[in-house]
Image (cartoon, grey):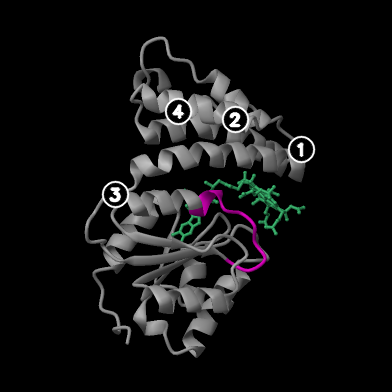
Amino acid sequence: MAIPELKIPDGWEGRAPGGWDWQPLWEAVEKGHHDFTSEFVQNSIDKDIDPRTILDDGLFPGFNLQGDRFSEQLIFIPEMLITARAMKAGLALIRPLLAAKAEKPLGNFVIGTVLGDMHDIGQSIVTIMLENAGFKITNLGTDVHPDKFIEAAREEKADLIGFSALLSTTVYYQKVTIEEITKAGVRDKMKILIGGAPTTQEWADEIGADGWGKDAIAAVKLAQALIQEKREAWA
Ligand code: B12
């Protein structure tokens, strides 16, 4: 087993002001110091560092280091949770900077993590990027029952709906949720996107989703393409 190490983003110095040092933020996220993380992220925003750079160069290294340790079972749920809390404290500050101020949204997008699954960092990043691209997002959070997805889709007259799943056991609920949407008679009113680390294009095809996004950038491209496609109108 390889001992996880901090992966320092290539060329980060070129994306930060002279004399800048991300090390304290890498350590704060790693150790789960969410107050310090917020302060440091705010300071980075005040220094006009690009929010994507804050995310990629500032927040991810410490998060990924703990993630690798969690995967190797060197740390456990409590430590991973406090790191996730720090990550989310940072994301919360970046979000308003990236959110588009479009007067007329490109479309209504409902997103959530499927039943039985508590992972929400990835879908939060997808949410931020989609907002940035001009979509109106309704984020239902984690552990979302298929009925709740259907109810929100009806309420929001969703154009697009997205299901995140991070566990090989919960990807099954992406399939179940699509089946329930079909049974409810609303399948053709929206385009369905899926994502999450264990998912693939093959899985998306197998369960009848309209698309699969490998990451947040792919999710945005996919959403922009699918919003152009024909859908049944909501009543
Ligand atoms: C953080 C984390 C946790 C945290 C979650 C905190 C939170 N608020 O999210 C906590 C500690 C709670 C946790 C718990 C568990 N976890 Co966990 N967790 C992770 C970890 C370290 C990181 C996941 C993550 O956030 N990745 C970063 C984000 C940015 O990536 P992402 O989610 O893949 O999202 C990107 C893309 O997939 C895509 N995307 C995501 N969603 C969507 C949606 C759409 C529509 C689209 C288009 C795209 C898209 O875009 C995103 C951005 O680029 C991973 C291991 C790892 N290193 O990845 C394990 C991991 C996912 N967990 C795992 C396990 C086993 C568990 C537990 C079962 C552990 C346990 N023994 O109880 C529990 C399950 C709890 C539950 N019921 O959900 C396993 C899953 C193995 C498997 N294949 O099933 C992993 C892989 C670790 C491992 N190797 O063992 N976990």
Q: Secondary structure at mark 1?
A: loop
Q: Residues within 10 Å of mark 1 (few under 14, many from 20)?
A: some
Per the model, the C-alpha gap separating discs 1 and 2 is: 22 Å
Residue at image mark 4:
42
| Tag nearer the camera, 1 or 2 | 2
Q: Is residue 129 magenta?
A: no
Q: Which residue is mark 2?
A: 35
Residue pictured at 58% horizontal, 67% vertical: 114
Q: Earlier in the sequence, mark 2 or mark 4?
A: 2
Task: Tell me which numbered mark, 2 or 3, is placed earlier along the sequence.
Answer: 2
Contact between marks 2 and 3 (CB within 8 A): the answer is no
* Distance in Å between CA atoms under marks 2 and 4: 11 Å
Residue 100, disc: 3
* Nearer-N-terminus badge (3/4): 4
Compared to 131, does 44 lie above or below?
Answer: above
- Nearer to us of marks 2 and 3 is 2
Is 115 magenta? The answer is: yes
Do callouts 1 and 3 mark residues in contact (Cβ within 8 Å)? no
- For the view shown, which residue lies furthest in the top direction? 19
Counting from the top left corner in percent of width and height, residue 184 is at: 49, 88
Residue 26 in the image, given as x and y percentages of width and height = 57, 25
